[in-house]
Image (cartoon, rainbow, N blue to C red):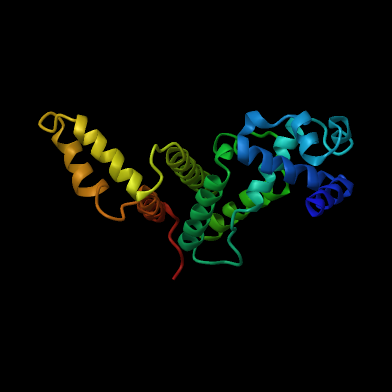
Amino acid sequence: MATTQTHRNAAHRSPLTRERILRAALVLVDAGGIESLSMRKLGQKLGVEAMSLYNHVANKDDILDGIVDLVFSEIALPSGRPEWKKAMRRRAISVRDVLLRHPWATSVMQSRTKPGIATLRHNDSVLRTLRGAGFTIDMAAHAFSVMDGYIYGFALQQINLPSQTSEEAIELAENILGELPADEYPHLAEMLTEHAMKPGYDYADEFEFGLDLILDGLERLRAPQPS
């Protein structure tokens, strides 16, 4: 008990910085969602009065901008000049994984009007890779939009699934089949029994199938490259 109290006191004595505030806010929001974020709760978590926070952050919006930028900083970016499809595939999987770690971020990431350094670096890196691969500026913008629409949409759908494991998915499918007049919905019954209820089925695996379709489609629209 004394050791725990010592660590808590040491944490409270640590200098209050913008970085420390944002890291604490990220933990708070990851645990309770955006609605859990308030200056009072954040101050309590840091062991300080809420007013002390205003020496380092302007307001709640400033904190949201900051934690969104922290989330962007977790996304793996292309390095050097890798083959563009591999780079975009790796980046897309990283974005999806980051969004699953921070479920609140899916509906907030694109809504901020004051992007931070990590956000700007991320966007510029994606565009640099696409432009370097021969996409025109218009096609690079289209490609970026299509990929992110798919990534964010899939992540949101995955986050909201009522089942998160193979066992839970099978149980859900069995419950649906139990209430389903199979003769009225034969194709849905077939999909559940022949696809979703297979051992080891994971809805998350559908992500890369769709991602590859998008990347293959974008490849056909890319400007011809010199041999």
Percent position of residue 225, x then y: 45, 64
Percent position of residue 48, x then y: 86, 37
Percent position of residue 38, x then y: 73, 29
- The answer to which of 68 and 54 lies nearer the viewer is 54
Q: Is residue 26 left or right of residue 92?
A: right
Q: Is residue 156 above or below residue 217?
A: above
- The answer to which of 224 and 190 lies nearer the viewer is 190
- Rendered image quadrant of residue 3: bottom right
Q: Residue at x 47, y 38 (%)?
A: 156
Percent position of residue 123, x then y: 62, 48
Q: Is residue 55 above or below residue 210?
A: above
Q: Residue at x 25, y 47 (%)?
A: 197
- The answer to which of 115 and 173 lies nearer the viewer is 173
Q: In which quadrant will I find the C terminus?
A: bottom left
Q: Residue at x 88, y 34 (%)?
A: 52
Q: Residue furthest front?
A: 1
Q: Is residue 78 left or right of residue 67?
A: left
Question: What is the count of numbered marks?
Answer: 0
From this viewpoint, is residue 114 visible?
Answer: no
